[in-house]
Amino acid sequence: MKHLMTMLLLSAYASCIAQNVADCETDLQAVAARRAHFLDRYINGHDTTDMDSIVVYNEKLQTRLLECTQTQESLDKPFKSLEEYNVGLTRSPDGLLSIYSWDDETGGTMRYAISVFQFSDGHRVFSQKPIWLETEDPDESVSFFYDVLDEVVSGGKKYYVVKGVAVGSSAVSVHTVKIFSVEDGVLNSDARLIKTQTGIRNELSYEIDFSASPNRDNPINREEAWLQYDAKSHTICIPLIQENGRLTRKKIRYRFTGTYFEKI
């Protein structure tokens, strides 16, 4: 009888959790749909009150997503239906890190990204905003659209390789590759695994401006400016940019050696 009661309780608990995840999916879709509704109205009518509503529903979507991404079930079954509303989802190969990112649609050619990081230490699941980007002056903050590129193990510890792109305008963008780790239930955004001449670093980043005079007559395709990554060889590839900001076709590569990413 005791065994039967335990099984019934576990079954009821699993059903409850599943229902909660289902409820979350429904709620998230509803919020995203309302956001899309006001965005469509704004694009077609340019009513400033609709923009206010877009801001409100961006905040609601992030808040609800933070609430809904703290269970194992939500990590195992991510909310892929949000992609219909232009909410991007990227996941690590082991499935223990997920990042949701979307354009808040409040900018012009400058794009503002909103993100939620969901991660697990193997036992518990957590979610948070990218707090490492927060500044005292919001006008000076930078937001990135993220993509999980790879995971590597160094010294028995797992690290995640994540690409970020910040769009300043149709001509200006910032590109970064950043290392993360999960330690005691905390997402470490300052994990250091990139060996450079100045020390072991957490990230590599660069800015490209195609409107600047050194690049106005530059025949190089803009795609040459994008950060690339080869997951098979665990190699980061970034463009060589001259001191005056001119983009070149030359590349700088950092390959994971088993301990660090090192320049080759």
Image (spheres, rainbow, N blue to C red):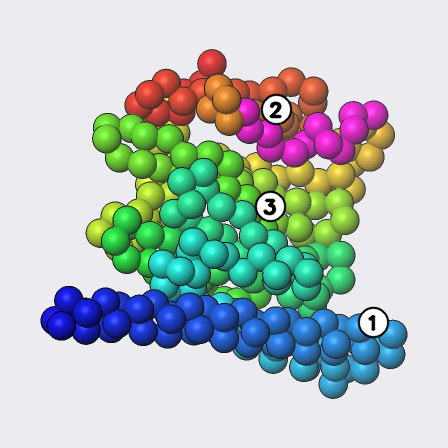
The stretch drawn in magenta includes residue 199? no
Q: CA distance from mark 1 to mark 2?
A: 39 Å
Please tell me how crowded label 1 is: few (under 14), some (14-19), or many (20+) other residues with Cα within 10 Å: few
Q: Is residue 35 left or right of residue 157?
A: right
Please say if the residues under marks 1 and 2 sit with CB atoms less than 8 Å apart. no
* SS under mark 1: helix
Residue 142 visible, this angle? no
The answer to whether 25 is drawn above or below residue 221 in the figure is below
Going from N to C along the chain, the mark reached first, 1 or 3, is: 1
Label 1 is placed on what type of residue?
Ile
Q: Nearer the viewer's eye, disc 1 or disc 3?
A: 1
Q: Which residue is mark 1?
A: 43
Span highlighted in magenta in the image: 219-230
Q: Which residue is mark 3?
A: 165
Please tell me how crowded label 3 is: few (under 14), some (14-19), or many (20+) other residues with Cα within 10 Å: many
Rendered residue at 76%/33% (across/down): 222
Please say if the residues under marks 2 and 3 sit with CB atoms less than 8 Å apart. no
Residue 240: give its label: 2
Rendered residue at 76%/62% (across/down): 108
Q: CA distance from mark 2 to mark 3?
A: 17 Å
Q: Residue furthest bottom?
A: 49
Rendered residue at 42%/56% (across/down): 75
Q: CA distance from mark 1 to mark 3?
A: 25 Å
Going from N to C along the chain, the mark reached first, 2 or 3, is: 3
